[in-house]
Amino acid sequence: MQGQQPKIGDDNTISFTVAHSHSITFGSGEAEISVLSTPSLIWFLEQAALQFLEPWLDQDSLSVGTHVDIEHLAPTPVGVQVQCTARLIYQDGPVYRFSVEAFAGGEKIARGLHSRRIVRLSQLTKRLRAQ
């Protein structure tokens, strides 16, 4: 990792608009509704944490997700903009833990915890090729 370490309390926010590719559909016909799926929401929350760490990584490092504990609190229809924030709450060596939240239209739609670990790309590649 390069430069100064990130500080506890620092955060990163990303935004996206819910597309059909991020949704799950319930019902049929006129009763059909498509809303943001939980797996897609988790992906964006992870991206907020991943992008937070990127400035501190060197060429042979990457961060991998190791834990996700998310509550999906409210449905969000296709076309709505969502903001996902990852706030650093803990760091010990290569382990980083984030408090994550997502908002749509001022309403909190998700909250939880996400952990990432910094690993050496060369070691990961070597391990995966050995399998």
Image: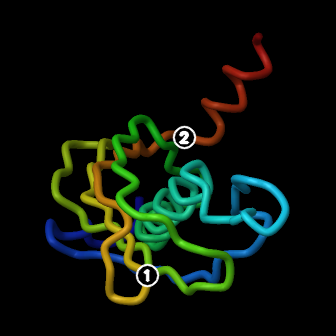
Camera-side residue of 9 and 79? 79
Q: Mark 2: which secondary structure?
A: strand
Left or right, residue 54 beside residue 92? right
Q: Residue at x 49, y 61 (%)?
A: 50
Left or right, residue 12 beside residue 119? left
The residue positioned farthest toward the top in the image shown: 131
Q: Which mark is residue 104?
A: 1
Instruction: Tell me the quarter of the picture where residue 72 sits.
Output: bottom left
**Residue 88 screen position, x and y as percent:** 24, 63
Residue tagged by mark 2?
120
Identify residue type, mark 2.
Arg
The mark total stands at 2
Q: Is residue 104 above or below residue 5?
A: below
Mark 1, Cα crowd under 10 Å, few <14 / some 14-19 / many 20+, is many
Identify residue type, mark 1.
Ala
The residue positioned farthest toward the front in the image shown: 30
Camera-side residue of 72 and 56? 72
**Residue 129 screen position, x and y as percent:** 79, 20
Q: How is the image coloured?
A: rainbow
Camera-side residue of 3 and 8? 8
**Residue 124 screen position, x and y as percent:** 63, 31
Left or right, residue 117 beside residue 40? left
Foreground: disc 1 or disc 2: 1
Q: Residue at x 25, y 43 (%)?
A: 93
The C terminus lies in quadrant:
top right
Sequence-earlier tag: 1 or 2: 1
- Do callouts 1 and 2 mark residues in contact (Cβ within 8 Å)? no
Q: Residue at x 63, y 83 (%)?
A: 17
